[in-house]
Image: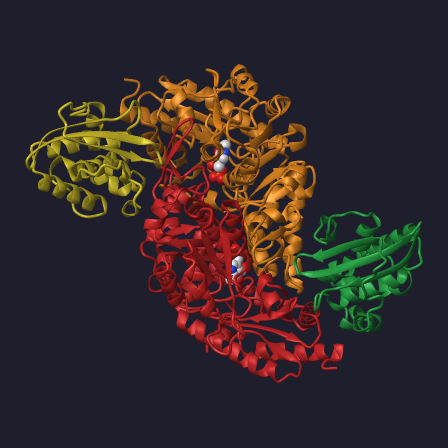
Chain colours: A yellow, B green, C red, D orange
Amino acid sequence: MVDLGELYQQTILDHNRNPRNFRRLETANRTAEGSNPLCGDRIHLFVHVDGDTITDIGFQMPQGAGCAISKASASLMTDAVKGKSIAAAEEMFQAFRDMLAGGTNAPGKLAAFSGVRAFPSRIKCANLAWHALHAALQNSAAPVTTESAGDF
Amino acid sequence: MVDLGELYQQTILDHNRNPRNFRRLETANRTAEGSNPLCGDRIHLFVHVDGDTITDIGFQMPQGAGCAISKASASLMTDAVKGKSIAAAEEMFQAFRDMLAGGTNAPGKLAAFSGVRAFPSRIKCANLAWHALHAALQNSAAPVTTESAGDF
Amino acid sequence: MLETQKLRRDFPILERQENGKRLVYLDNAATSQKPRKVLEAIEHYYRCHNANVHRGAYGLAVEATDAYEAARTTVARFVNAWTREAVVFTRGTTESINLVAGSWGRANVQRGDSVVVTAMDHHSNIVPWQILCQEKGAKLRMVEITADGRIDLADYGKALDAKPKLVAFPYVSNSLGTVNPAAQLSKLAHAAGAVTVVDGAQSTPHLRVDVQALDCDFYAFSGHKMLAPMGSGALVAKPALLDAMPPYHGGGEMIERVWDDRSTWNKVPHKFEGGTPNVEAAVGLEAAIAYLEHLGMDRVAEHEQELARVAIERLSQIEGVTIYGPRDHRAGVVPFTYGDVHPHDLATILDRDGVCIRAGHHCTQPLMRRLGVAATARASFYIYNDVDDVDVLVSAVRKAGELFGVPA
Amino acid sequence: MLETQKLRRDFPILERQENGKRLVYLDNAATSQKPRKVLEAIEHYYRCHNANVHRGAYGLAVEATDAYEAARTTVARFVNAWTREAVVFTRGTTESINLVAGSWGRANVQRGDSVVVTAMDHHSNIVPWQILCQEKGAKLRMVEITADGRIDLADYGKALDAKPKLVAFPYVSNSLGTVNPAAQLSKLAHAAGAVTVVDGAQSTPHLRVDVQALDCDFYAFSGHKMLAPMGSGALVAKPALLDAMPPYHGGGEMIERVWDDRSTWNKVPHKFEGGTPNVEAAVGLEAAIAYLEHLGMDRVAEHEQELARVAIERLSQIEGVTIYGPRDHRAGVVPFTYGDVHPHDLATILDRDGVCIRAGHHCTQPLMRRLGVAATARASFYIYNDVDDVDVLVSAVRKAGELFGVPA
Ligand SMILES: Cc1ncc(COP(=O)(O)O)c(C=O)c1O
Ligand SMILES: Cc1ncc(COP(=O)(O)O)c(C=O)c1O
């Protein structure tokens, strides 16, 4: 059996306690709202894109609405994509999803979420921020939810 | 096991083939419509009541809508109650129901239906005409159906 | 033909007797019997994985959710649905059609519009449209049937001339056995600008269904007629239509956010699955599909059609027997009458020989009126029936004739 | 207290492990586990009596019909319904409430009317009324709760001043455990001229219900929360109301006569049971009721209340734990939060110790907003739980605190 420590790796606990980029971005030119309708977790994502580059990014979660996994994932995601090109960010999203679907680890600190694989009920939590990022980059207006087929 | 001959006694087969009082009664002052909604069987009953006495009675069933049991029962019922008082007719109905519910045989030719007891799915057929009679004598306007709790 | 002797051993109920005789169950159009594998799937679910789905963080709940969603994928594949989200689990055909009438119908049908059904439709594909049309002040148009029991294409064309909003018809008639040219009917209806609702209650259990080939908009079926538990079934619909439709049942699971006075909806198909879903039903339906696919739906269809052919041939040899429905393009449903012996009496007499058939209007009163009968007797076959069953049926019918002195 | 060690042996799933630990199933408010007797009743039905009901002349069909109607009588007795015809079988609470909203509601609620629900209602007793009110241009009024998690009677009185057409409330709250004074609430609503809808999803499984004593007009519950199969449940209603209501689902079984363009309806309760009924569900529900009655509903209630009392006592001793809901008048539902550990994380951590609890909004988002939380953790007890289970729960919660460093 996979140990709880695999899921709640120190990086995750740390980012949960002290989330990075946890702020509203007044200069954002792309935003998205994401929600996990089944648990009520919600994220607001603010992105500033300059040409092809994500120059700044921030997120907020309503009071109490964000488990350790979803909050840490948002925190690490924002750190990872800041300063990257849109294409690079989308690639990271793909790598992240692949990891959670049972594939090889995503690069860098994102690998901290490899333990989520053994906790299927939490995969949506880990993906939430990334789905929102994807929506923001596509500039899709509709709020995204994690309630899509691929996530079962 | 109860033999089919118990159900389809000669009296029943005979009344099915040659139903008595199988006619519309132009002079009727009480009428009722009965139906078994689950099989579609239907009866129209015409009664002439003079004071307290059933002086004449007739019934019709739409083309093809009446199994041997329901048709023979209507035929024998009309024969049995003709010339009787309303109270006597209601008593016969009670005796008939009691018989079908597992009690002792009803008087006279009505006993021909004792075999129906062993065929629960046909009890409603045997009761249909009697329910219609009861409704006509109560002068209740609503069409009756056999789909009532007591008949299960 | 299928190896019925072997198959029967999978169906525990077929070991029981009916009135001291071997049970010859010929009421499969009403409901089917269940193979051991389906009963085991139900039991296994409750013994090992039972939990409420979609909302649990613990292992059991994940397993139940996975089982439920895997069943959806299986159903989608079985009828070749557009996507797995095109499958909305319901209690069965009746609920599926009421969902379409209550959601799509209420949102799209207006005063003066017309809705088309056929004279061979089951009450479940008539009454919801009557209620909708009465509520909306729309007109319900019933397409006539031909003398040999097919949808009258000339009359169908006339009905389409009125540019109906919606056209509903059965793929296979439960009272005649007619297999309707559903793809053609759907195409004609689309050309007239209508959406189509196909009642698949009698097709899904008995032949290979491909909703994309039919190109219908809504397809409804019941699990209990195809080896699956009661309470199982689905509405399969084009995803874009489902997306645009208002919800049906309000409640848990179908919402995204609930405010005091308004709510937003979850994604399709969840939007239409308010309340705790019936996971047992989904799991049982999946097991039933596995059983049927193992046999092969083409072989299933062939088997039943052959039984119907033999039954029609042998029953026709009895003087006084009338068979209803077309000569060809028919499924394993054989409706008949016998002189003036009422079908109820026939059913009772057959039951004494262990033969279970249905007698009545088969929930198709408008059709019965057109056939000019109050009721018919109906034998309907499934995978566990064989020619022996047909023989028992035929000799029991002859016996009824003797008892009633038919032909007179 | 009940003899849980003995009872557990009746529940096969409790022999399985969750993450290598004894399964401590504490999500009973979501759905219950099933005793062997219920699984056997299902299997026995399919092995021996399965047929479509109400329309068959043969023996099997009579047996299935008898089983189905006997279950109705049992349900009627269990909740002390007015008559057996007062029991309409549905898929569960959500469907029952939607039936009332779709039939009684559509026929009786008009523009400018008001409908009252409470802030502690489940989405299934809110969303159908939102949809109805939006459709009709009526006003939905949500009654506030008190600080300790009861219906605010002062606000309830104010809501009644507007002479609402209908008042809906839960007998027992699934998110707070509050046992509401349903008879009193119903009486007040009647005095204001309203009909009452009682959501019995959390009361029927857990305490003795007497709908005549409550004198409510509609009472809804789900079988799957009370040992019965998924897909079982009922709407229990005053017969005169049911008689006057238009039908809900159109289809087979619910009609008397069907013409091309209109129909007449079968008697109550059949008028509301369009389509093939789920006999399995009814038979399973009857077996579940027999099981519960054998234990005695008063003892069931007492057992769960005692477990809740112990759980609240022990959880309260952990610094940082907050318990929601009133001190007394509560059922076996214990909602809590623990510092800033998100309930989802709690649930995951508890699951590693075999403890299944629910984390989330529990389909009560308006309530969560009033509690000022996004989610809570919820342990809910049933007959097979005992104080050992409470202890496992409490020590798993402590473990979560250590992992997350709470209290900080
Ligand atoms: C209070 C309450 N009402 C309604 C429901 C809905 O019941 P179901 O999902 O069985 O329809 C539930 C359970 O989910 C509940 O707890
Ligand atoms: C053609 C047809 N449509 C609809 C139905 C209704 O199906 P259900 O009763 O399972 O909802 C049936 C069977 O009863 C049927 O044969």
Residue C400 screen position, x and y as percent: 71, 76
Q: Nearer the viewer, residue B1 or C296?
A: C296
Q: Nearer the viewer, residue C238 or C8?
A: C238
Q: Nearer the viewer, residue D164 or C8?
A: D164
Residue B16 screen position, x and y as percent: 79, 70
- Asked which quadrant contains residue D45, the reply is bottom right
Decide if residue A125 is on the left or right side of residue D238.
Answer: left
- Asked which quadrant contains residue D108, the reply is top right
Judge whether residue A105 can be spotted in this image.
no
The residue under the point 60% across, 62% down is C365
Q: Quarter of the image containing the C terminus of chain D?
A: top left
The residue under the point 21% across, 39% down is A140
Residue C78 screen position, x and y as percent: 37, 61
Judge whether residue D127 can be spotted in this image.
yes
Instruction: Report the number of numbered marks.
Output: 0
Residue C293 screen position, x and y as percent: 39, 66
Decide if residue C402 is on the left or right side of residue B29.
Answer: left
Q: Quarter of the image containing the N terminus of chain D?
A: top right
Decide if residue C55 is on the left or right side of residue C349.
Answer: left
Decide if residue A27 is on the left or right side of residue B52.
Answer: left
Q: Nearer the viewer, residue C182 or B48?
A: B48
Residue A117, above or below C12:
above
